[in-house]
Amino acid sequence: MFRRLIKISIVVLLVVGILAAIGGQRIFGNNTLHSISQEVYIPTGSTLADVSELLKDQEIIKSTSSFEWVASLMKYGSRVKPGKYKIEPNRSNRELISQLRLGVQEPIKITISTARKLSDVAGVVAQKIEADSLAILSALLDPSFLSAQDLTAETVIGTIIPNTYEAYWTLSPEEFAARMVKEHDKFWSQKNRLSSAEKLGMSKSEVATLASIVEKESIQDDERPIIAGLYLNRLKQNIPLQADPTVVYGVGDFTIRRVLNRHLAHESPYNTYLHSGLPPGPICMPSISSIDAVLDPDRHDYLFMCAKPGYNGSHSFARTNAEHERNANVYRRWLSNQGIKG
């Protein structure tokens, strides 16, 4: 009898040991498939089953059953946090679930360069975060947001400073809008930009609006202070800006290469041939180079500009209309010779 009890005890201990070993392997053993790190995006509202299926479909884990078993032990099902996660190789279920449960996300980078319209900005950002472009656009155009920042639907694009920003994939549209305001304020607090705008007698929105015209007039950084000075001269003398890029923006056809009389006659608050002063808002998101060109323009007495023949984007500048017409005729002949009609 005693020997039988010993045998039974030994068997029980062996079974317990085997189960403990299996459990330990499930908890602490490597359950990842790849030898390099992998990225996974867990959407908002995901359940444990969703995460398990996602990891299986992306071939990140070896065993879904062991993952789900350990996840249940660690009560991960009630603590699923959305986000972008970087899964390192040789991860145990315990390590992987701890990372996911704590919400230790991998940061993402959002690069925003000059864009034509606010919808273009929203589209770029939507490629990097969970929210869609419509939700982002709605947050930027929300009346309460615009009112709180003293902005309008026309001027809000000038609040976004082109740069690369680090954030998380779960960044909400409202958080994005608030972040852009914070970065905008930070930008304007540097390099005496606020005092420079005050000396010009311009608000930040007005600077951004003029900078957007400068942006679309030239692709050459060294010309932008000259162009900014030219338009400031026209504003001071109450001369209409007569900037072709504003006409193109008002027409809404951004394929136009040659502005014709029918374009100049198109009624739009952005048509600076028909309306004096600045348009209602920026015609694009201006670059930092263009903003700083307006804040520190070249001092000269130019009032006219015209593109030079060729494709390098440079311009001829003039003080008088007669001089400008000579430059314009040279450019018109070149356009015709190139077969550029509109």
Image: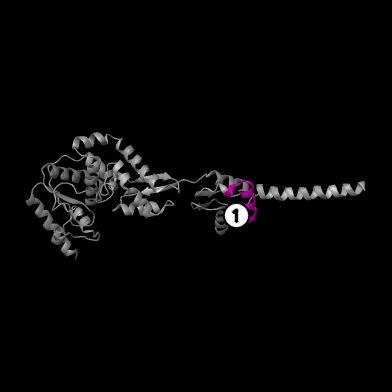
Q: Quadrant of residue 57?
A: bottom right
**Residue at left 39%, top 53%?**
126
- Dot 1 amino acid type: Ile
Q: Is residue 141 above or below residue 264?
A: above
Q: Position of residue 194 (x, y in %)?
A: 26, 35
**Residue at left 54%, top 43%?**
102
Residue beneath disc 1: 61
Instruction: Inspect this view and state whether residue 92 appears.
Output: no
**Residue at left 78%, top 50%?**
15
Instruction: Inspect this view and state whether residue 95 appears.
Output: yes
Q: Is residue 142 above or below residue 248?
A: above
Q: Position of residue 185 (x, y in %)?
A: 32, 38
Q: Is residue 259 left or right of residue 34?
A: left
**Residue extending farthest front:** 144
Q: Mostly what secondary structure, the magenta segment?
A: helix
Q: Position of residue 256 (x, y in %)?
A: 22, 60
**Residue extending farthest right:** 1
Q: Which residues are magenta?
A: 60-77
Was residue 279 drawn as part of the magenta stretch in this picture? no
* Observer-nearest of 128 and 313: 128
Q: Position of residue 48 (x, y in %)?
A: 57, 52
